[in-house]
């Protein structure tokens, strides 16, 4: 049973709006809709039904598409949010009630899920959102925990306790919550809980640009901002726990699972950076003094130290990498000596500074320090560094297991005859390439026909062994797109329309079968869309599951031509970045940008990122670019 089906959403809109001049807060216009409509849009995906608690303008609330019921306080008399909660619980047909105030248009899209997880973990009756806030008057003060009792998830069966509490005359939410077993959930995005209290605040927000956390109102009001979808995915997935120990070379391109702590200083001893003479800095001639002549008393080779300390007026011939003899603190490269005659070395003032040309013990790495932090993908330099510490074996995360398949009756595999109306399956090849380059252990499950039973069997099968499943096709709303239906049956899967191009539809969630589960990324079928969606959503999530740090190879380049762009969605266009005549980075587009035109991807060496709020780009303007090298 999905979480969503257990939850009733309650929008608390029953207040007097005292701080807003007694207007009905929820009905105030905000970014093309009302405040309550924004709250509804963010609650609806998290609940089986949404109920509004309002004491005025009931028909206006009822007119909001998707509202199951509008209910006034049972106790009457504007007694505050606890009275609204009582009414909500009375009308809650599910096991759980999720509350949000009508003036919080940015509430988190994973509110129910995160509150529920804490409730389960702590065996609580209710879970409340908490954020860390800082004192605006005193920014230097330590941040404090701010609970948000109006953002809570409660068991519906606490109603008798609430009735009894209200009967005592008490009205404070916090007071009532203290009588229950309460879990607190810390959200790191305090902005998501912002509410709008005054008309001035409302107007200020209206004027501000659509924030990154809000849906893409510039285009389709229901479309989700790319950053919001990325955040939702990032917050849900976690690194796999399994670790394996590998001989150093086998760890190349794997994710380091434990910090590498340096057992030694590197270098282990002070040594020479030059071939020359090791000497005592005190012997160097002062300004205006005559050159000094030092007598060579021995030779220090790399690996064969010279153990005697030179006395005043003496030096030691030394090779690069050799340990600095005792008593010496400087090295003069032999070519900087004024003269060398047998064992006599003449040095003029100013040839070197005292302390020059020494590589100090521990200057590269200190014993006991972190040489490489866990989460790093091991590259050639890391192999070398680990070897320099004398470490022969490293702990890496086990490879992430990713199963993938294509969906569609029109698809044909290589070697098959291309019937009328059919296309060769290319997505499985791009997916194979992208996943393999990322370092995943892949399972190619082939093509799955547009048939509900076949899809269900494939998804169940994939759950058994895979950490993640990637599918392509069938996530839009076509008549043969059964994928959505089956995905929803097998788990908590959200279907998003994203404010982006290409890659508008995306399914993400957890599918389960017989106790096994896997994260599902249902990518769109169009061949460019599948790649862009993979890079923007699946790649960062898979890296996180792999326990790896997520980086994107980004730069800026000047557009050689004007680019049309409508604000309100993120666009990813294929580009070719290079160096212009003036030595500056510049980028041009690869022509046709249709999401079926795969040749535009092979031609390109980068993706030009045109951000959500960005409008038309003029020729010569700087744009953000994601380089394929490092990304792919
Ligand atoms: N009424 C609407 N229609 C569509 C919308 C929309 O919002 N409203 N979105 C469009 C966008 S954008 C995309 S992207 C596609 C995504 O659709 P699906 O994920 O359902 O994918 P399919 O319908 O199965 O296929 C789309 C397209 O891609 C070709 N395809 C699919 N799989 C492969 C493959 N493995 N190899 C090569 N080509 C593949 C398929 O033949 C179709 O041409 O929906 C739009 N429609
Ligand atoms: O955005 Mo669709 O993903 O254009 O092809
Ligand atoms: Mg389709």
Image (tube, rainbow, N blue to C red):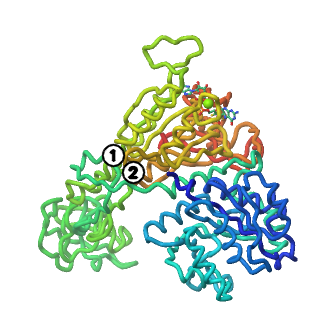
Task: Compare residues 105 and 260 and report the one nearer the observer.
Answer: 105
What crowding class fits label 2: few (fewer than 14 Cα within 10 Å), some (14-19), or many (20 or more)? many
Of the two numbered discs 1 and 2 on the same chain, state the one appearing first in sequence. Answer: 1
Give the image location of residue 41, x and y in percent.
70, 55
Q: Which residue is denoted by mark 2 in the rendering? A: 546
**Secondary structure found at label 2:** loop
Picture residue at 56% right of the left edge, 45% below the top:
536
Which quadrant of the figure shows ligand 2?
top right
Task: Compare residues 444 and 136 and report the one nearer the observer.
Answer: 444
**Secondary structure found at label 1:** loop
Q: Is 594 situated left or right of 385 in this image?
A: right
Instruction: Identify the image quadrant of residue 38.
Output: bottom right
Picture residue at 68% right of the left edge, 88% below the top:
169
Give the alpha-carbon distance from disc 1 to disc 2, as whole Å: 7 Å
What crowding class fits label 1: few (fewer than 14 Cα within 10 Å), some (14-19), or many (20 or more)? many
Give the image location of residue 569, x and y in percent.
71, 46
Give the image location of residue 224, x and y in percent.
66, 50
> Is 525 above or below relative to 105?
above
Q: Which residue is denoted by mark 1 in the rendering? A: 399
Instruction: Identify the image quadrant of residue 25.
Output: bottom right
> Is 169 above or below relative to 198?
below
Picture residue at 60% right of the left edge, 40% below the top:
607
Task: Compare residues 444 and 173 and report the one nearer the observer.
Answer: 173
Give the image location of residue 312, x and y in percent.
20, 80
Residues tagged 1 and 2 counted as in contact (Cβ below 8 A): yes
Task: Compare residues 25 and 398 and report the one nearer the observer.
Answer: 25
Q: Specify the label residue 589 is tagged with.
A: none
Q: Is 480 situated left or right of 356 in this image?
A: right
Instruction: Identify the image quadrant of residue 387.
Output: bottom left
Q: Is 438 situated left or right of 91 in this image?
A: left
């Amino acid at each position: 049973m999905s979480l969503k089906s257990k939850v009733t959403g309650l929008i608390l809109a029953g207040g007097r709006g005292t701080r807003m001049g007694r207007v009905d807060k929820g009905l105030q216009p905000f970014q093309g809709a009302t405040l309550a409509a924004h709250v509804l849009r963010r609650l609806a995906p998290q609940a089986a039904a949404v109920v509004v608690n309002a004491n005025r303008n009931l028909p206006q609330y009822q007119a909001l598409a998707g509202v199951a019921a509008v209910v006034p306080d049972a106790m009457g008399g504007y007694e505050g949010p606890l009275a609204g909660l009582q009414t909500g619980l009375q009308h809650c047909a599910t096991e759980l009630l999720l509350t949000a105030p009508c003036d919080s248009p940015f509430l988190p899209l994973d509110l129910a899920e995160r509150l529920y997880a804490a409730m389960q973990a702590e065996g609580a009756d209710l879970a409340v959102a908490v954020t860390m806030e800082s004192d605006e008057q005193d920014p230097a003060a330590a941040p404090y925990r701010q609970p948000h009792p109006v953002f809570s998830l409660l068991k519906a069966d606490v109603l008798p306790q609430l009735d009894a509490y209200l009967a005592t005359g008490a009205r404070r939410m916090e007071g009532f919550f203290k009588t229950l077993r309460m879990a607190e959930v810390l959200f790191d995005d305090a902005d998501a809980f912002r509410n709008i209290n005054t008309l001035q605040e409302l107007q200020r927000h209206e004027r501000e640009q659509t924030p990154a956390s809000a849906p893409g109102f510039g285009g389709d009001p229901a479309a989700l901002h790319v950053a919001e979808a990325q955040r939702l995915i990032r917050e849900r997935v976690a690194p796999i726990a399994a670790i394996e120990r590998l001989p150093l070379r086998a760890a190349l391109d794997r994710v380091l699972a434990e910090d590498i702590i340096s057992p030694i200083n590197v270098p282990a001893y002070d040594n020479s950076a030059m071939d020359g003479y090791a000497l005592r800095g005190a012997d160097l001639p002062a300004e205006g003094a005559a050159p000094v002549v030092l007598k060579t008393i021995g030779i220090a080779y790399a690996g064969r130290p010279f153990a005697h300390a030179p006395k005043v007026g003496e030096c030691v011939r030394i090779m690069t990498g050799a340990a600095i003899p005792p008593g010496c603190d400087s090295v003069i490269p032999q070519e900087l000596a004024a003269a060398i005659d047998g064992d006599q070395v003449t040095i003029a003032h100013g040839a070197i500074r005292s302390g020059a040309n020494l590589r100090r013990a521990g200057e590269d790495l200190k014993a006991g320090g972190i040489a490489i932090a866990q989460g790093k993908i091991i590259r050639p330099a890391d192999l070398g560094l680990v070897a320099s510490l004398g470490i022969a074996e490293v702990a890496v995360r086990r490879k992430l297991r990713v199963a993938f398949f294509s969906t569609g009756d029109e698809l044909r595999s290589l070697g098959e005859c291309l019937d009328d109306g059919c296309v060769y399956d290319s997505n499985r090849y791009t997916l194979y390439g992208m996943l393999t380059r990322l370092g995943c252990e892949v399972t190619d499950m082939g093509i799955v026909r547009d048939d509900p039973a076949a899809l269900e069997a494939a998804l169940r099968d994939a759950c058994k062994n895979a950490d993640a499943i990637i599918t392509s096709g069938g996530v839009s709303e076509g008549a043969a797109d059964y994928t959505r239906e089956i995905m929803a049956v097998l788990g908590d899967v959200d279907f998003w329309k994203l404010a982006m191009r290409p890659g508008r539809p995306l399914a993400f969630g957890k599918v389960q079968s017989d106790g096994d589960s896997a994260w599902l990324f249902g990518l769109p079928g169009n061949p460019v869309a599948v790649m862009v969606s993979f890079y923007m959503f699946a790649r960062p999530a898979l890296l996180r599951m792999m326990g790896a740090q997520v980086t994107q190879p980004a730069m800026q380049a000047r557009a050689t031509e004007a680019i049309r762009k409508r604000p309100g969605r993120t666009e990813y266009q294929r580009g070719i970045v290079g160096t212009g005549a003036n030595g500056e980075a510049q980028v041009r587009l690869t022509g046709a940008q249709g999401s079926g035109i795969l040749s535009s991807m092979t031609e390109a060496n980068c993706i030009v990122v045109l951000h959500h709020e960005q409008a038309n780009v003029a020729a010569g303007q700087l744009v953000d670019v994601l380089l394929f090298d490092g990304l792919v």
